[in-house]
């Protein structure tokens, strides 16, 4: 998957976790926590959904990489290079 | 081979099941009773629908709220706010002799009422609210502090302390007399800082949505499937044997049966000490009216009453019930949406503290007689605090501690389980975990949160 596709995949996951959020104006550089008020349970969900949908494993020590959209895409790009977009 | 076997199809077990099935686990929920719901179940009698547990869903926050347990569980279970169809309360009341504190889903009303009744103590009340806001949910050591002691240090008016404790103990305190500070904070937030609501169709709407979702994700639900033994080898549960002898294998077990109740199932433990079981159980006297309660001047959603200045939260000392305190719930008094309107019939539910052993010891004839007698006494006690509705009753039912035991399987029919909570949900076995009342969260939203958090912590990380 290319970075733009990974971004779409994350938007899809966020839409599932927080269906009431408007994600069209999401700022890639600002942390999810500040924009969406995600808590630790939600972060676990992002990790779990990545595993369920793309078989990507994110070890617990890497969770800080999922801070913002930008950092998440950067972190996932090498891990998801072989994943097919859905 | 299941990934997870869940014991109990109540709110916590179902919520845990949804979480695990969503993440592609093979999950089976085992329920001993012939219906789902546990404490928060429902039944039908004489053509009418009744709820067992639910007076009010606590922790209510309006649509769009991002914080609080309700928003969290909706996200975790992928439900829309509308799926639970919660209608907020009209307003409730704490009623002591000569003193009333009204409250609703906005803390300001309670604060104004404290100012009206106890003008010299409103600053102390504010200090209490600040302490509660600072309380950290995950801190086991401050959880176990004495709630009464912290209240005594914060508020100098004993009557105000008793009045604040009354609804919080009624809706979630497993221990007699005192309340753990953590439990107090959780209950204070869920009732006074968040609030009460109810779906028009009662608890069955929430349960049906939970079960539908669980099944659509491939989860299996087995009713009339009580667990006889959890077979243990070397601190590890190897399989679960049902009452009918069927053996099921699972990588792990998540039990909402209660702590003592679960330990007793394990093949490696001798009978645990029954004195540590919960003691607080109730009867509920339900009256169906030929008119809406509001037409009698009863606009209260819930009334928590107590007949003296001292609130006694304890097992009855001398009789089947203790009439000094009780709860009056009128499910009509919620603000239902216009397209649903009013409930078709008036209903008043009176909850009274009861003694499990005395109720359990009655023979069938005595039991039926006791139900009639204590219905009359409970209702007579309650109408000191709500407009007398007795002339308008067209049907009644009473459920008792033995009914609650049948639905919950808790020792003593203890509504809120055992006093000692296991916040991390662990047991002496490396693959058996607890969720539900004995893990620490109570109420419908709390129970679901318990199932979700224990599923996340113990069943999803491998």
Image (tube, coloured by chain):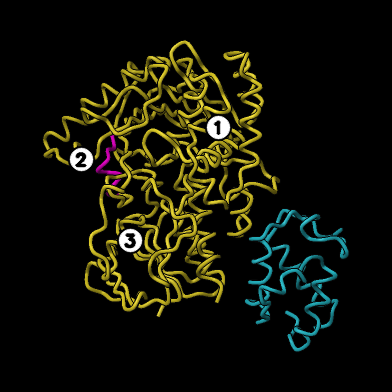
Chain colours: A cyan, B yellow
Residue range in magenta is B398-406
Q: Is residue B12 above or below residue B45?
A: below
Residue furthest to the top: B98
Distance from Cα at disc 2 to Cα at disc 1: 42 Å
Label located before the other in sequence (2 or 3): 3
Q: Nearer the viewer, mark 2 or mark 1?
A: 2
Quadrant assignment, res B131 = top right
Q: Which residue is mark 2?
A: B357
Chain to which the residue tagged by mark 2 belongs: B
Residue drawn 67% across the image and 77% down it = A59
Distance from Cα at disc 3 to Cα at disc 1: 43 Å
Are there few (<14), some (14-19), or many (20+) residues within 10 Å of tag 3?
A: many
Determine the secondary structure under disc 2.
Answer: helix
Q: Is residue B199 visible?
A: no
Q: Position of residue A5 (x, y in %)?
A: 81, 77
Q: Is residue B251 above or below residue B141?
A: below
Asked if badges 3 and 1 are on one and the same chain, I answer yes
Distance from Cα at disc 2 to Cα at disc 3: 21 Å
Please tell me whether the stretch drawn in magenta is mainly helix, strand or loop.
Answer: helix
Determine the secondary structure under disc 1.
Answer: loop
Marks 2 and 1 close (CB-CB < 8 Å): no
Q: Quadrant of the C terminus of chain B?
A: bottom right
Determine the secondary structure under disc 3.
Answer: helix
């Amino acid at each position: 998957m290319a970075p733009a596709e990974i971004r779409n995949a994350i938007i899809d996951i966020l839409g599932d976790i927080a269906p009431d959020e408007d994600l069209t104006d999401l700022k890639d550089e600002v942390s999810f926590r500040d924009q969406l008020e995600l808590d630790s349970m939600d972060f676990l969900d992002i990790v779990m959904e990545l595993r369920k949908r793309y078989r990507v494993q994110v070890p617990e020590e890497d969770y800080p990489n999922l801070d913002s959209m930008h950092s998440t895409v950067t972190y996932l790009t090498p891990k998801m290079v072989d994943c097919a977009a859905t | 081979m299941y990934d997870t076997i869940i014991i109990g199809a109540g709110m916590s077990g179902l919520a845990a099941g949804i979480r695990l099935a969503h993440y592609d686990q093979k999950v089976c929920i085992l329920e001993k009773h012939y219906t789902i719901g546990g404490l928060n179940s429902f039944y039908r009698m004489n053509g009418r629908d009744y709820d067992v547990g639910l007076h009010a869903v606590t922790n209510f926050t309006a649509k769009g709220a991002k914080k609080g347990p309700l928003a969290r569980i909706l996200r975790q279970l992928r439900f829309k706010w509308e799926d639970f169809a919660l209608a907020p309360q009209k307003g409730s009341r704490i009623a002591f002799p000569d003193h009333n504190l009204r409250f609703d889903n906005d803390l300001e009303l309670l604060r104004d009422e404290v100012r009206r009744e106890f003008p010299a103590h409103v600053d102390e009340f504010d200090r209490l609210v600040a302490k509660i806001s600072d309380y950290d949910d995950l801190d086991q050591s401050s959880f176990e502090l004495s709630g009464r002691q912290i209240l005594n240090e914060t508020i100098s008016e004993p009557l105000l302390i008793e009045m604040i404790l009354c609804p919080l103990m009624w809706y979630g305190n497993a221990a007699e007399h005192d309340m753990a500070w953590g439990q107090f904070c959780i209950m204070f937030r869920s009732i006074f800082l968040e609030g009460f609501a109810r779906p028009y169709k009662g608890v069955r709407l929430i349960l049906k949505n939970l079960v539908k979702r669980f099944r659509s994700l491939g989860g299996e639900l087995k009713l009339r499937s009580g667990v006889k033994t959890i077979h243990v080898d070397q601190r590890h549960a190897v399989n679960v044997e049902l009452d009918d002898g069927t053996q099921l294998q699972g990588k792990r077990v998540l039990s909402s049966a209660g702590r003592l109740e679960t330990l007793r199932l394990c093949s490696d433990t001798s009978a645990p000490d029954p004195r540590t079981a919960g003691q607080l159980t109730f009867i509920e006297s339900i009256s169906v009216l030929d008119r809406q309660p509001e037409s009698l001047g009863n606009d209260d959603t819930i009334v928590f009453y107590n007949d003296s200045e001292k609130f006694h939260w304890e097992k009855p000392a001398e009789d089947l019930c203790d009439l000094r305190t009780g709860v009056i719930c009128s499910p009509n008094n919620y603000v239902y949406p216009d397209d649903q309107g009013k409930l078709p019939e008036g209903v008043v539910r009176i909850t009274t503290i009861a003694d499990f052993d005395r109720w359990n010891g009655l023979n069938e004839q005595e039991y039926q007689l006791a139900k009639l007698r204590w219905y009359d006494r409970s209702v007579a006690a309650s109408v000191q605090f709500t407009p007398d509705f007795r002339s308008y009753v067209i049907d009644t039912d009473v459920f008792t501690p033995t009914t609650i035991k049948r639905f919950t399987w808790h020792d003593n029919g203890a509504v809120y389980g055992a006093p000692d909570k296991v916040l991390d949900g662990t047991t002496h076995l490396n693959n058996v975990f607890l969720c539900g009342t004995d893990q620490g969260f109570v109420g419908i939203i709390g129970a679901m949160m318990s199932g979700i958090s224990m599923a996340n912590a113990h069943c999803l990380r491998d």
